[in-house]
Image (cartoon, helix red, strand yellow):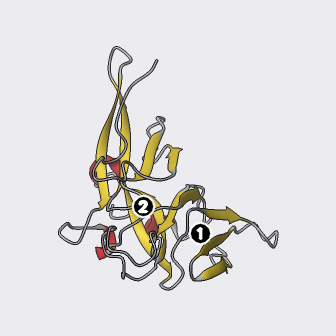
Amino acid sequence: PYHPFAFGRWSRSSPGGAEMAVYDVNGDGLNDVVTSLQAHGWGLSWFEQKKGPGGERSFVEHQIMGDFSTENAGGVTFSQLHGATSADVDGDGLPDFITGKRFWSHLDTFIDPDPQGAPVLYVYRTVRNAKAPGGAEFVPELIHNRSGVGSHVAVVDLNNDKAPEIITGTKNGTFIFWNNWKTPPSPKARRGPP
């Protein structure tokens, strides 16, 4: 059945986020949603799916990153999360969320927040942690601080080593980031605190 829910923010002339990822973030058997909240603004959240006793569906928002005034995962803050995708980048069997800042979305105008901010690219590793809100958290890992993302970011195994590479084209050029996570992080590191 249809269950309307706003996975984003509506303001100014840039309503909503960019690409969405749908996967079971916390391991409860229900697909959740991970998305930017405004493609030309601020915000990254995951939405935990809940199923009521009568089968009704609802979602609970868990903020990963807001603006400079909020507490953010890993202390990371950037705007204009225009391109995003998900893939198991670190080889632990869980999808991770890849996104970054789209640099100069509208040339060098100031209609978008923080237009001169560093064009960063991040992997947010999905970490299941029973003590975290919703039973999971996202741990940011900086990939690059001068590429950012354009309108799209792709993940594909270019050299057949079973470790997917990250590819993006931006105003700063086209970038391939070769995956050097050859072994998944230890289970203890992935689960977070006991």
Kind of residue indicated by mark 2: Arg
**What residue is pinned by disc 1?**
184
Q: Residue at x 48, y 35 (%)?
A: 29
Kind of residue indicated by mark 1: Pro
Q: Residue at x 36, y 48 (%)?
A: 15
**What residue is pinned by disc 2?**
191
Q: Residue at x 43, y 59 (%)?
A: 127
Q: Decide: few, some or many residues near mark 2? Use Cα within 10 Å; few <14, some 14-19, many ≥20.
A: some
Residue 182, relative to residue 155: is it above or below?
Answer: below
Residue 10, relative to residue 159: is it above or below?
Answer: above
Q: In which quarter of the image is the C terminus?
A: bottom left
Q: Residue furthest top?
A: 54
Most foreground residue, 148 or 30: 148
Residue 184, percent across and down? 59, 69
Q: In this view, does 4 lie to the left or right of 145?
A: left
Callout 1: SS = loop
Residue 168, percent across and down? 62, 71
Q: In which quarter of the image is residue 65?
A: bottom left
Q: Which residue lies furthest to the bottom in this view?
A: 146
Label for residue 72?
A: none
Residue 157, relative to residue 48: is it above or below?
Answer: below
Most foreground residue, 133 or 77: 77
User: Is tag 2's residue or tag 1's residue first in the polypeptide sequence?
Assistant: 1
